[in-house]
Amino acid sequence: MIPTSSQPLVLASASVSRARLLAQTGLSIFCDASGLDETPIKQAYRAQESDAGSCAEALAEAKARMVSIRHPGALVIGADQILQCEGNWYDKPATPQEARDHLERLRGREHELVSAVCVVRDDNLLWHHVDRPRLIMRDFSDGFMDEYLVMIGEEAFASVGAYQLEGYGAQLFSRIAGDYFSILGLPLLALLDFLRLHRVVKE
């Protein structure tokens, strides 16, 4: 896919996976992580018993707005993802024990990866989208979990579910339903449709 516009395109994220997805489509992306403290927003939405999609969308927008102030005139992409399982929301694990706890709670169950993306320019929200792929973890053994955590090491801390589906994490699952790119953290096809409308990529 070939860019057709000189409009600057900024990704308000430090996510290597999201940046790679965009770069692989042929887009020229500048990455500028927002540094947003997500905790107050998540606490507020949880206190209101709000839908995970609304929270993910609010986080994506807040990140994009913060970064858009630093890049006048640029299209700024904000994204966020919340893992939801049986009414519980999961954040990225910060320690090996937290990663193990996540996997113990998720194995043998279905969970939802609520993935939100938005585009902001000059602090104005132009577009937003939420996708909800669903994944079922197989009921793997403790021995497999031990081996898996050793194999991936610190990569376990890079995603909310302590897995990367595009790698060894695929071994954790029995079934997935939904968009593959959204599972990786970015509803890419919907975003590309928006960018085509704004002539950032060819129609």
Image (cartoon, rainbow, N blue to C red):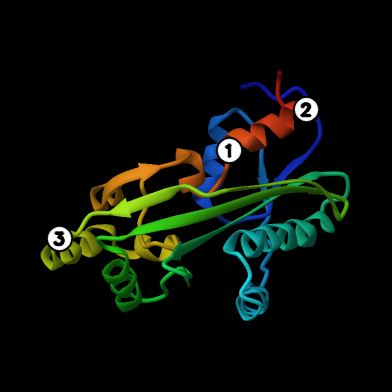
Q: Which mark is residue 188?
A: 1
Which amino acid type is shown beneath numbered disc 3? Phe
Q: Residues within 10 Å of mark 1 (few under 14, many from 20)?
A: some
Residue 132: image location, x then y, percent: 52, 49
Q: Which mark is residue 44?
A: none
Residue in the picture at 25% in, 53% down:
172
Q: Residues within 10 Å of mark 3 (few under 14, many from 20)?
A: few
Which amino acid type is shown beneath numbered disc 2? Leu
Q: CA distance from mark 2 to mark 3?
A: 46 Å
Residue in the picture at 71% in, 49% down:
118
* Nearest the eye: 177 or 97: 177
Residue in the picture at 42% in, 50% down:
134
Mark 3 falls on what kind of element?
helix
Q: Is residue 159 left or right of residue 2?
A: left
Mark 1 falls on what kind of element?
helix
Residue 190: image location, x then y, percent: 63, 36
* Residue 99 position (above or below residue 3): below
Give whichever of discs 2 and 3 has the lower sequence position: 3
Residue 71: image location, x then y, percent: 82, 51
Q: Which mark is residue 144?
A: 3
Q: Which mark is residue 197?
A: 2
Quadrant housing residue 37: bottom right
